[in-house]
């Protein structure tokens, strides 16, 4: 397959204004394309006293832009059977359009409107504010989100960019006015430090020309200064218990701060996490669910970003099964850190991870998700093709070393949220 | 008018002598193959005492068959980089496996092995019991699950749609391995199954392979059609649930037609005009689809005005008459009565005056265009082909889409008037007990 028609190859160029444009081919036979603008405007950049800014700003920006209010924007997307989505994390805000290849130019134009010409209609701000208040309440009321939040607060000190969940506080969001959103959007929707990833038919050169026509010059070129990243906390050894009577299930989290995506130990840590809780073959799923029947879900995830990351094992179970389920999760976490993974088990997990690569490229949307990751972390144009060889080169010792250094080297946090004792 | 331009893949359909329906959708360029088995068996086939059995069988079909001991199905698929899962609905159960195309033999072997010969070992049934309880408990943490379950329980008195596919907690605790095995052997078999294979394969070779693996299976599976008819509802029914949570909301359901009803195309448009979702003909995956539909009636009336933070409608296609539902979540400080009143006024307005010509034109465009990209990738193709096979005869999807794109405002108005009757309405409110216990 030629590299310009191979979805596993992600090539990029950087314009003089700093905007990086990356392009990968859509899967063979796919009639759709996807384009994502990634801005350095995650919630780590929320101004002091105005937590929730990034999330609210992105939601309001995607509600109406250019000449289109929210109804016209929705109708425009419907005309093409297209979607506009957004995603905010601590580091970035992403806006993505997906639609038919035949509508590439008009939909790219819509993306440019959202990025460069959002309307920030006051009525949209009022609505988004109400919806954010509700999500804040829900985050507090649900055992799963409550446990996630408590875990991050236990791992990271105040002021750390990964400590918050982005929803902000009621006071912070209530304080936000249109001018705050305009200011935040203008200073964080830049060309330098930002990225535009296209998965579709046009070549890289043609994509650059299309982006030039649609986006032109950015009003703000210079990327914002990244936030200060203090070291993670040394967690308390005792578990954090959050009693939430009236619920049916307790959510268990065992986690810690971990390495960044660019760390050379990442591939070994990634594979160690796959062994621990990354699939149905993983130890957590097999031990906690399949062997012991203690929980419906038991897994783990490694969330490595640019400035660091966190790693977490999770399970959900009824209060009467909480003690053994918690013991098993903690014990599997300790085992991956301290013992060598037997070669057969390592081989099985490795084959699985390598074998699933074609599945991720079934659809434009699946390929695009990987393309954005490759481009954002500057993993190189042929990263996907080289990834199997990188994984094959890892030994059991590499995994143990990476796990012991990247999974709770400074101590683990256990959080339990839900009905901690069975109903009487 | 919008043309029905869904890029539906070329398919080949045949039936084996034992009753198994086979649907093949080859895509020579696809690097993957997706194998689906759909059974026309779901919670509609259960009865009090064995509720949740279809879902439990779904779990058991991963836990042992003659050629695959417990754990070996997962291992066989995942070791080659495949993915697999299953889900249970009121009307059907579906199992799928997607693998790199050169591994197609693996899912075919699995499905042929477990279609009629799953072991349903008593020891595994017992062990699985706590996992299923845990799955249900996870759902119970969400007030929306509890309210939805209550809505159907109150709206239906006889028909099996009155319980959720997860089953009653009491039945999950008490169902015996023998009863579960009997349920499996009664309904699961070639006569009630549709095998769908989509992706990169050579059709002639696969046809022979399917015959070799499946034609020898016995012709089994009792007729899964349900004859119980829910009596007409002759008055509004109401219920209130309370529990942990922070936001009050209301779910309202009205008796609505089955998918085979001539009113279905108009009801689909009614759902789009009222709530905005295109559902059956949605574009792409859930990924990226916005839950906000600012031009829909409910959104304009409730969300724009600050009465609610969320307001949606749903008509889910079902084999038997079920419900058209509206879900509305109150904004902070807004009494639920006001929210409910606004919903009722809005649906009555639609029943009285119908949609505007512009609304109908927009809804047709939305559905027609969304359908264009609905088949991308082997997994999604396998899902759509199988799903529509559960809902209607061959060609059902294309015919339905053509009819939907011709529906008039008058027909939508008639569908609204027939659906939104006071006497056919069930209302369930959720009033949170607040966060004090959590503070």
Image (tube, coloured by chain):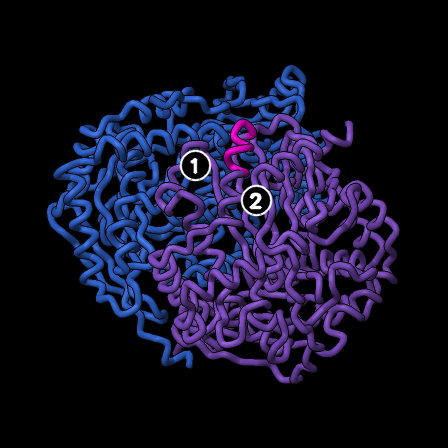
Is residue B434 one of those drawn in magenta?
A: no
Q: What is the letter of the blue chain?
A: B
Q: Is residue A90 left or right of residue A260?
A: left
Q: Earlier in the sequence, mark 1 or mark 2?
A: 2
Considering every residue shown, the one lying at the far top of the view is: B204
Mark 1 or 2: the one toward you: 1
Taking the spot 59% from the left edge, 50% from the top edge, the residue there is A218
Residue B243: image x %, image y %?
A: 33, 70
Asked where in the image residue B173 lies, by quadrant, the reply is bottom left
**Which element is circle 1 on?**
loop
Taking the spot 26% from the left edge, 26% from the top edge, the residue there is B407
* Quarter of the figure with the N terminus of chain B: top left
Taking the spot 49% from the left edge, 67% from the top edge, the residue there is A52
Taking the spot 44% from the left edge, 45% from the top edge, the residue there is A66
**Which element is circle 2 on?**
strand
Residue that badge 1 annotates? B282
Could you say which disc has been placed on residue B85 in the image? 2
Could you say which disc has been placed on residue A350 in the image? none
In which chain is the residue bearing label 2?
Answer: B
Which residues, given as a range, are shown in magenta? A101-108
- Colour that chain A carries in the picture: purple
Q: Is residue A75 left or right of residue B374?
A: left
Which residue is nearer to you in this view: B418 or A34? Answer: A34
Q: Is residue B124 left or right of residue A378?
A: left
Instruction: Characterize the local packing of mark 2: few (<14), some (14-19) or many (20 or more) Cα atoms within 10 angstroms.
Output: some
Residue B52: image x %, image y %?
A: 41, 50
Which residue is nearer to you in this view: B349 or A227? Answer: A227
Instruction: Characterize the local packing of mark 1: few (<14), some (14-19) or many (20 or more) Cα atoms within 10 angstroms.
Output: many
Looking at the image, is A317 positioned above or below residue B233? below
* Quarter of the figure with the C terminus of chain B: bottom left
Which residue is nearer to you in this view: A245 or A260? Answer: A260
């Amino acid at each position: 397959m030629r590299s310009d028609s191979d979805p596993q190859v992600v090539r990029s160029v950087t314009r003089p204004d700093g905007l990086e444009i990356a392009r990968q081919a859509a899967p063979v036979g796919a009639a759709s394309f996807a384009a994502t603008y990634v801005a350095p405007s995650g919630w780590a950049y929320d101004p002091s006293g105005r937590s929730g800014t990034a999330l609210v700003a992105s939601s309001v920006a995607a509600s109406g832009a250019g000449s289109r209010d929210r109804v016209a924007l929705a109708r425009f997307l419907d005309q093409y059977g297209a979607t506009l989505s957004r995603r905010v994390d601590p580091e970035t805000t992403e806006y993505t359009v997906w639609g038919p290849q035949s509508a590439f130019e008009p939909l790219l134009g819509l993306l440019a409107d959202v990025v460069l010409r959002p309307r920030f209609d006051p009525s949209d701000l009022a609505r988004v504010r109400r919806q954010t208040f509700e999500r804040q309440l829900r985050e507090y009321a649900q055992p799963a989100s409550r446990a996630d939040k408590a875990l991050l607060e236990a791992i990271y000190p105040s002021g750390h960019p990964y400590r918050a969940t982005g929803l902000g506080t009621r006071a912070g969001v209530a304080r936000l006015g249109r001018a705050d959103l305009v200011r935040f959007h203008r200073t964080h929707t830049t060309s330098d430090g930002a990225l535009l990833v296209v998965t579709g038919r046009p070549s890289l050169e043609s994509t650059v020309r299309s982006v030039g026509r649609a986006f032109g010059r950015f009003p703000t070129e210079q990327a914002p200064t990244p936030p200060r990243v203090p070291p993670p906390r040394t967690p308390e050894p005792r578990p954090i218990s959050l009693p939430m009577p009236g619920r049916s299930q307790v959510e268990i989290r065992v986690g810690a701060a971990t390495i960044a995506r660019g760390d050379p130990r990442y591939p070994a840590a990634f594979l160690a996490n796959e062994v621990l809780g990354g699939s149905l073959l993983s130890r957590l799923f097999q031990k906690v669910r399949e062997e012991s029947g203690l929980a419906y879900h038991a897994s783990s995830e490694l969330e490595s970003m640019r400035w660091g990351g966190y790693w977490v094992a999770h399970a959900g179970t009824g209060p009467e099964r909480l003690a053994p389920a918690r013991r098993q999760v903690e014990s599997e976490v300790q085992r991956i850190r301290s013992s060598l993974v037997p070669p057969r088990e390592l081989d099985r997990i490795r084959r699985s991870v390598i074998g699933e690569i074609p599945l991720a490229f079934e659809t434009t949307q699946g390929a695009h998700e990987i393309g954005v990751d490759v481009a954002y972390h500057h993993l190189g144009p042929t990263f996907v093709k080289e990834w199997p060889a990188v994984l094959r080169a890892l030994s059991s010792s590499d995994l143990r070393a990476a796990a012991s250094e990247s999974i709770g080297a400074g101590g683990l946090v256990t959080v339990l949220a839900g009905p901690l004792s069975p109903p009487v | 008018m919008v043309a029905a331009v869904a890029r539906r893949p070329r398919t080949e359909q045949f039936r084996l002598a034992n009753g198994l329906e086979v649907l093949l959708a080859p895509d020579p360029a696809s690097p993957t193959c997706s194998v689906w088995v759909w059974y026309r068996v779901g919670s509609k086939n259960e009865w009090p005492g064995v509720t949740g059995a279809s879902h439990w069988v779904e779990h058991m079909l991963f836990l042992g068959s003659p050629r695959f001991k417990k754990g070996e199905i997962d291992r066989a698929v995942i070791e080659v980089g495949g993915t697999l899962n299953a889900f249970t609905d009121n009307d059907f159960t579906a199992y799928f496996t997607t693998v790199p195309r050169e591994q197609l033999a693996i899912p075919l072997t699995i499905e042929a092995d477990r279609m009629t010969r799953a072991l349903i070992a008593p020891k595994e049934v017992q062990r699985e019991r706590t996992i299923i309880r845990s799955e249900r408990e996870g759902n119970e943490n969400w007030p929306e699950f509890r309210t939805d379950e209550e809505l159907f329980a109150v709206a239906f008195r006889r028909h099996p749609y009155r319980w959720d596919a997860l089953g009653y907690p009491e039945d999950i605790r008490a169902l015996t391995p023998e009863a579960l095995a009997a349920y499996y052997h009664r309904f699961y078999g070639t006569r009630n199954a549709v095998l769908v294979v989509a992706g990169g394969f050579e059709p002639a070779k696969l046809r022979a392979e399917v015959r070799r693996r499946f034609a020898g299976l016995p012709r089994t599976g009792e007729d899964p059609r349900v004859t119980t008819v829910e009596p007409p509802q002759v008055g509004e029914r109401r219920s209130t649930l309370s529990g942990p949570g922070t936001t009050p909301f209301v779910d309202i359901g009205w008796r609505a037609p089955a998918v085979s009803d001539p009113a279905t195309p108009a009801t689909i448009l009614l759902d789009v005009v009222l709530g905005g979702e295109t559902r059956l003909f949605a574009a792409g995956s859930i990924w990226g689809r916005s839950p906000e539909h600012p031009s829909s009636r409910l959104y304009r009336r409730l969300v724009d005005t600050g009465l609610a933070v969320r307001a949606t409608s749903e008509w889910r296609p079902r084999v038997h008459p079920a419900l058209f539902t509206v879900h509305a979540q109150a904004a902070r400080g807004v009494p639920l009565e006001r929210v409910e009143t606004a919903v009722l006024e809005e649906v009555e307005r639609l029943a009285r005056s119908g949609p505007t010509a512009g609304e109908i034109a927009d809804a047709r465009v939305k559905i027609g265009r969304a359908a264009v990209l609905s088949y991308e990738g082997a997994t999604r193709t396998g899902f759509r082909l199988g799903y529509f096979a559960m809902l209607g005869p061959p060609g059902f999807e294309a015919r339905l889409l053509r009819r939907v794109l011709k529906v008039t405002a008058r027909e939508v108005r008639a569908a609204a008037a027939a659906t939104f009757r006071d006497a056919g309405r069930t209302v369930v409110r959720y009033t949170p007990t607040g966060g004090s216990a959590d503070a």
